[in-house]
Image (cartoon, coloured by chain):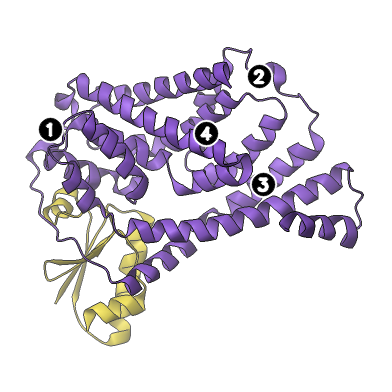
């Protein structure tokens, strides 16, 4: 139905010829923007309601004194539903380790939470389809679980800033919201998030549409195809500075995949965009000594590169 | 009454501070309004997501920016 509307608007009302470059690009742009904003609005709202039942204080209680493995898996899963913003990373980290959440389990949470986020998932689902979105969730969780286990095994507690262990942490009551308050929260959350990301979505889809219409087919096959072994690490390195712009990056990557970028490379790039961020590293420097910070970044980067090669090999 | 806004200085924390100030002005209530930005003081309240609003030592909410109207509701 949406497709018919976009066709009617571009080919009948505006009068561009189907199959022409500008016609295709505009059609693509209108169809994708409407579809993505419909998905974003409904799903962000639903996710926000679910999240009101998982405040970080509750997650902390669920995870404290959990063993590794079970703890890592649970932490990665809770990372999906617990609201997280990198500006709260420091109090969250201290709250976790102070209440006895093992360090590796804390990292599983810190990795999964920004990576498996609803905006990235919606964009992937809307543009790439549900299969790729599910693969992204699955491999994202796997990266978070494995990297957390590795960090736990390395026994790096002494590379947490010393003051963290001496901190007195109070016990905040978990505020129970009424259903009405949950709805209000979700509405406000959806509005704020959309307000923040809509320019990125429009620009991203716009650039994607341009690439779709004007860049020759197989343009990237040589550079970013599966036969180039450097494509995955280079994509991960490029993803780091693009932090938190999943909304703008995914439509562009979608168009690039049509032009020959391999699927593993696409996944690795997206994971690097969401999971590895310089601002978050700077914030985490308040609680981590350099060596642990480097191990954290290095482990996650290696796991992501591995995922990239894996999917280039099997898909 | 003492109102504290807990937050490490992010944009959301500033908005919550401004909204609280507005709520106080509009409701004509007087209170001591302070920003708390150092981590140990924030952790003392057990708050894990910022910004948070504390009235007389009690955490009213955390992890969201409430509107002036909402804050006025909590104040009264």
Q: Which mark is residue A225?
A: 2
Of the numbered discs 1 and 4, the one sitting upstream in the chain is 1
Q: Which mark is residue A270?
A: 4
Of the numbered discs 2 and 3, the one sitting upstream in the chain is 3
Q: Quadrant of the C terminus of chain A?
A: top right
- Whole-angstrom CA distance, mark 1 to mark 3, is 46 Å
- Residue that mark 1 sits on: A162
Query: Mark 3 — on which chain does it sit?
Result: A
Residue A181 position by quadrant: bottom left
In the picture, one chain is purple; tell me its letter.
Answer: A
The percent coordinates of residue A263 (x first, y second) are 59, 26
Residue at x-position 79% and y-position 28%:
A217
Residue at x-position 88% and y-position 43%:
A19
Of the numbered discs 4 and 3, the one sitting upstream in the chain is 3
State if disc 1 and disc 2 touch (CB < 8 Å).
no
Q: Secondary structure at mark 1?
A: helix
- Residue that mark 3 sits on: A205
Q: Nearer the viewer, residue A7 or A171?
A: A7
- Whole-angstrom CA distance, mark 4 to mark 2, is 16 Å
- Whole-angstrom CA distance, mark 1 to mark 4, is 34 Å
Q: Quadrant of the N terminus of chain A?
A: bottom right
**Chain B palette colour:** yellow
Above or below residue A133? Residue A232 is above
Q: Which mark is residue A58?
A: none
Q: Secondary structure at mark 4?
A: helix
Q: Residues within 10 Å of mark 2 (few under 14, many from 20)?
A: many
State if disc 4 and disc 1 touch (CB < 8 Å).
no
Query: Mark 2 — on which chain does it sit?
Result: A
The percent coordinates of residue A85 (x first, y second) are 36, 49
Q: Is residue A140 left or right of residue B47?
A: right
Residue at x-position 7% and y-position 39%:
A166
Of the numbered discs 2 and 1, the one sitting upstream in the chain is 1
């Amino acid at each position: 139905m949406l497709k018919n509307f976009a066709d009617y608007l571009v080919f009948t009302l505006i009068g561009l010829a189907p199959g022409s470059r500008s016609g295709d690009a505009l059609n693509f742009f209108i169809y994708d923007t409407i579809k993505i904003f419909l998905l974003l609005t409904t799903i962000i709202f639903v996710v926000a309601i679910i999240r009101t039942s998982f405040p970080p204080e509750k997650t902390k209680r669920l995870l404290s004194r959990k063993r590794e493995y079970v703890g890592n898996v649970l932490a990665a899963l809770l990372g999906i539903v617990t609201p997280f913003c990198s500006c709260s990373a420091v109090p969250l980290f201290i709250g976790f380790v102070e209440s006895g959440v093992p360090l590796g389990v804390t990292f599983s949470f810190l990795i999964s939470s920004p990576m498996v986020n609803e905006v990235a998932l919606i964009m992937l689902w809307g543009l790439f389809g549900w299969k790729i979105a599910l693969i992204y969730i699955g491999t994202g969780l796997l990266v978070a679980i494995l990297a957390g286990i590795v960090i736990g095994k390395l026994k790096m507690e002494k590379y947490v800033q010393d003051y963290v262990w001496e901190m007195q942490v109070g016990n905040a009551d978990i505020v129970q919201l009424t259903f009405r308050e949950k709805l209000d929260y979700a509405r406000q959350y959806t509005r704020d998030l959309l307000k923040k990301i809509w320019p990125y979505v429009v620009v991203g889809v716009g650039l994607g549409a341009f690439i779709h219409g004007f860049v020759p087919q197989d343009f990237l096959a040589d550079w970013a195809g599966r036969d180039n072994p450097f494509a995955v690490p280079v994509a991960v390195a490029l993803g780091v500075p693009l932090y938190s712009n999943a909304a703008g990056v995914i439509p562009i990557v979608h168009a690039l995949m049509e032009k020959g970028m391999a699927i593993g490379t696409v996944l690795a790039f997206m994971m690097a965009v969401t999971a590895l961020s310089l601002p978050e590293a700077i914030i985490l420097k308040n609680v981590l000594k350099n060596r642990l910070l480097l191990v954290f970044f290095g482990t996650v980067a290696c796991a992501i590169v591995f995922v990239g090669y894996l999917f280039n090999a099997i898909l | 009454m003492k109102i504290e806004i807990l937050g490490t200085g992010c944009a959301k924390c500033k908005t919550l501070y401004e909204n609280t100030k507005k709520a106080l002005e509009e409701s004509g209530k007087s209170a001591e309004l302070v920003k708390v930005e150092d981590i140990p003081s924030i952790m003392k309240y057990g708050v894990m997501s910022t910004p948070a609003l504390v009235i007389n030592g009690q955490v009213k909410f955390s992890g969201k920016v409430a509107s002036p109207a909402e804050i006025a509701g909590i104040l009264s």
